[in-house]
Image (cartoon, rainbow, N blue to C red):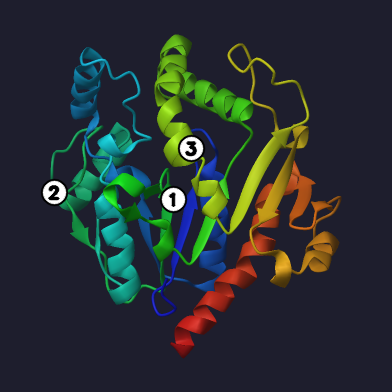
Amino acid sequence: MSKKHPIISVTGSSGAGTSTVKVAFEHIFRRAQINAAVVEGDSFHRYNRAEMREAMKKAEASGNRNFSHFGPEANIFDELEKQFKTYGETGTGKKRYYLHNEEEAAEHNKRLGMALKAGEFTPWEDIPSGTDLMFYEGLHGGVVDAKAGVDVSKWVDLLVGVVPIVNLEWIQKIQRDTAQRGYSAEAVVDTILRRMYDYVHYITPQFSRSHIDFQRVPIVDTSNPFIARDIPTPDESLVVIRFRDPKNVDFPYFLSMIHDSFMSRPNNIVVPGAKMGFAMEIILTPIIYKMLENKQKA
């Protein structure tokens, strides 16, 4: 970890809702005039979209039904750790973008003067010097691969986990991928099943390493996520916020600021689902300011 070049990492599974946390951080950065180097987790996938399809076919033909974007075979964990280490030491590094759709492709093609397509990567570019901190959002911001000797988490100054209960996570993924990405429900369920081994071994262990976890819990029936017609709304949810080290957490202040919040354990605070973004900003803002103070002193 580095006081001079701090790193914030938001990590969560596909469909977990990490974008909500990203928006909260964007609000904080804008108000505090923080110049953040933004690194996207998808840019550290090993394969582009077409290559991934071929790699999946080969894996399945060889009897591997667990090949997925969640595991080490489909990612470059060593390069991700190198990026975190390099930024922490120097405040610089490399980044690229994975182009999820034609709109993103058009945006970056205009910027780069290229003709890339959706599902491809942009070339690696230098992170501009002089940024205040690095902000990562993706699947593996705290990943450890013991076999490969990779530990991304040890370079992170603030690791935030976004962890809805698994049925809600699956509902969100099924709804998003069918409505926005054109997949059939059957194809999405197949993806969930294929990813399960890597989910257990590479995704969930990160949330024991995170400094703060935000877990959305619906208060409506989600017992069969594969037939759910809608995603439970924020008003139909609670958010459990877990602090790994509660000794310096000002719980009385948070309880006074977040209406209808309460403590369920000595290191947990529970807030209404509709207050999730507000709670994030209330909790994370002083942490970020403290990081910047330490940066100035380093």
- Which dot, 2 or 1, sits closer to the camera? 1
Q: Is residue 216 left or right of residue 35?
A: right
Q: Of the residues shown, which amino acid type is indicated by label 1?
A: Glu
Question: Mark 3 or mark 1, which is nearer the start of the sequence?
Answer: 3
Q: In x, y percent, where is residue 254?
A: 78, 63
- At numbered mark 3, what does the secondary structure look like: helix, strand or loop? loop
What's the mark number on residue 113?
2
- At numbered mark 1, what does the secondary structure look like: helix, strand or loop? strand
Q: Residue at x 28, y 33 (%)?
A: 102
- Which dot, 3 or 2, sits closer to the camera? 3
Question: Mark 1 or mark 2, which is nearer the start of the sequence?
Answer: 2
Most foreground residue, 194 or 200: 200
The residue at which mark 1 appears reads as 137
- At numbered mark 2, what does the secondary structure look like: helix, strand or loop? loop
Q: Is residue 150 left or right of residue 6?
A: left
Question: Mark 2 or mark 3, which is nearer the start of the sequence?
Answer: 3
Most foreground residue, 36 or 142: 142
What's the mark number on residue 13?
3
